[in-house]
Amino acid sequence: MTALTPRLKAIFATTKTVCFGRFIVDVPATATVAWGSGSVDLGIAVYPDAAKEVDEEAEKFIEELKNTKAIYHDHMPLFLSEEHIEEPLGRIITGYEGFDAMQGLKISGYFSWGKDGFIIDARPLQEDRSETVADIKSIAQRLRPRVEDEVPAEPGNCLEYAFLRDKPGTGGEGTVAHLRIGFRLKEFPDTHVSIFVGPSNPHHSEGNSLEWRLADLEKEQRAEDPNHPMLKTVYFRRGPRQIHDWLNGWEAISRSPDQPDAHGVHDFVLQVKGIPNDVLHPYADIQMETGVADNLAGAVKPSLTDEEAVAVWDAITSTIRVRPTTTKASAQQSSRKPLGERLVSGRTCSQTGWWQAAEPAAAHALPRRRIEAGATMPVAVVAGKPTLWDKLKGEQPRHQVQAVWQLVAYED
C-alpha cells in the first residue's frame, strides 16, 4: 500500500466507518457520503421528514392509475386495489403496468415512521402479485431508520437512512441487493470515489471482464491511430488485486494524458467477480476519478499528485470489509433488560420480547406484540375525528401518535 504524504496523513488521521449493504469502509471524517439508488429484492427509498409528501405521492399514484385506461381491454382503469397497513402505517397500491401491458403490474407501498416516509416499489407479473405484496409487507416490517454513522450489529443490509434486517433464520440467503454509494473528499473536491455491489453473475465470461475490455479498447485505439493520445495513458498498477477475502479482483489505476480540451485525470477501477449466490462475496465495481467538476472528468486539474492519488485509493479500498455481526447465540448470552423496561415510540428496541402499552388506557392502541431487539418501537395508531368528507366517503381517518411501551415478557 502506498504511504500517505504529510497532508494526506492529516486528513486520514480521523476517519469514520460507513456501512453499505453488508459491508463497511473507512473514509476521512470530513468526507461527504452520497448514495445512489438502491434495492434489496425490491426498490427501497427513504425520505426523511417527508411522511406527508410520501402520502401525497400515494394519492398521485392512485389518481394516475384511475385516470389511465387500458385501450385494448374496454378502456378499464389501470387501478386494481389499495390495501391499508397498520404497522408500519401505510398502504399498498396495485395497478396494471401500462395501458397496453396488462400482464405486468406496478405495486408500490407507501409507509411512514412518524415524520419520515419510505416507498417500496415492485414491477411483477400478474401471477406474482400475492407473493410481491407479501414481500413488500415483510420488507416494511423489517426496515428501520438508521443514521449515517450507525453500524448495526445484526445481519442485514445498510441503506441510505435505513437498515433492513434479514428474514429470521435465512442468513440473508436468496437476498438480491444492488447498492451504490459514493464519497466526496472535502479537501479534494474534484476527487470522487464510488462503490457498487450486486449479485455475482454465475454466467460471467472473460469478455465481460475489465481486463478484456481494456485490452480491446487499446486494440481499437491502435487501429484508429498508432499515435492515439490515449495510448499514452500511464498505468501505476494493472492486474489482480485482493481485498481481504474478496480474492478475484482485477484493477487498473492510471493517469490519462492532458488533452487540448481537457486535463489529464486519474481513472482508477477495481472490479471483483465475486462468488455466485454468496451474499458476502458480491460483484463489486469500485472507481475513483480526479479532475471532476460538474460531473465532468477533466474539467479541472487534479488536486492530487500521482503518488497521492494512489495513496488515497489504497487507503480507502483496503478498508472495505464485511460488517461484523452479532450471532443470535452471543446475543442471548448478553444481559437481559429487566421486565418493566420502558421505551418511547421511535427508539430502538433494547430487548427481544413481548411489549405492550405502559398505560392501561392506551392498551387498545398498543396491543401486546413481540418486538425484536434493534427494531424501531412503533407508534400508536389512533382513530381521528372524521370530517364531513370522510363520512361521505365512508372512511375513518387515522393518526400516528407517540406512545410508551413496556417490556412484559421475554420470548422464551
Image (spheres, rainbow, N blue to C red):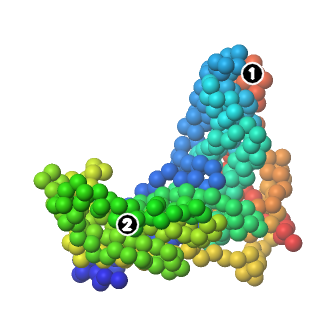
Residue at 65% from the left image edge and 66% from the top image edge: 277
Q: Amino acid at mark 1?
A: Lys
Q: How many discs appear?
A: 2
Q: Who comes first in sequence, dot 1 or dot 2?
A: 2
Q: Can residue 8 be seen at all in this image of the molecule?
A: yes
Q: Quadrant of the N terminus?
A: bottom left
**What secondary structure is found at the residue carrying circle 1?**
helix
Kindly indicate the quadrant of the structure image that contains residue 340.
bottom right
In the drawing, what numbered circle is on residue 393?
1
x then y, percent, for residue 203: 58, 61
Q: Residues within 10 Å of mark 1 (few under 14, many from 20)?
A: few
In this picture, is 394 found above or below 319? Answer: above
User: Quick check: marks 1 and 2 in contact, CB under 8 Å?
Assistant: no
Residue in the image at 24% along x and 77% along y = 307
- Residue 78 percent across, percent down from the top left: 67, 25
Q: Residue furthest front?
A: 223
Q: CA distance from mark 1 to mark 2?
A: 57 Å
Res 27 quadrant in image: bottom left
**Whether residue 291 is situated above or below residue 119 in the rendered picture:** below
Q: The C terminus lies in which quarter of the figure?
A: bottom right
Instruction: Point out the frontmost of discs 1 and 2.
Output: 2
Residue 55 lies, in percent from the top left, at 61, 36
Mark 2 residue element = strand
Question: In the image, what residue occupies the spot 53% across and 79% down?
Answer: 245
Which residue is nearer to you in this view: 234 or 91? 234
Image point (32%, 59%), residue name: 217
Q: What residue is shown with label 2?
A: 269
**Left or right: where does residue 70 sit relative to residue 24?**
right
Percent x, y of residue 63 = 62, 25
Residue farthest along the top direction in this orientation: 74
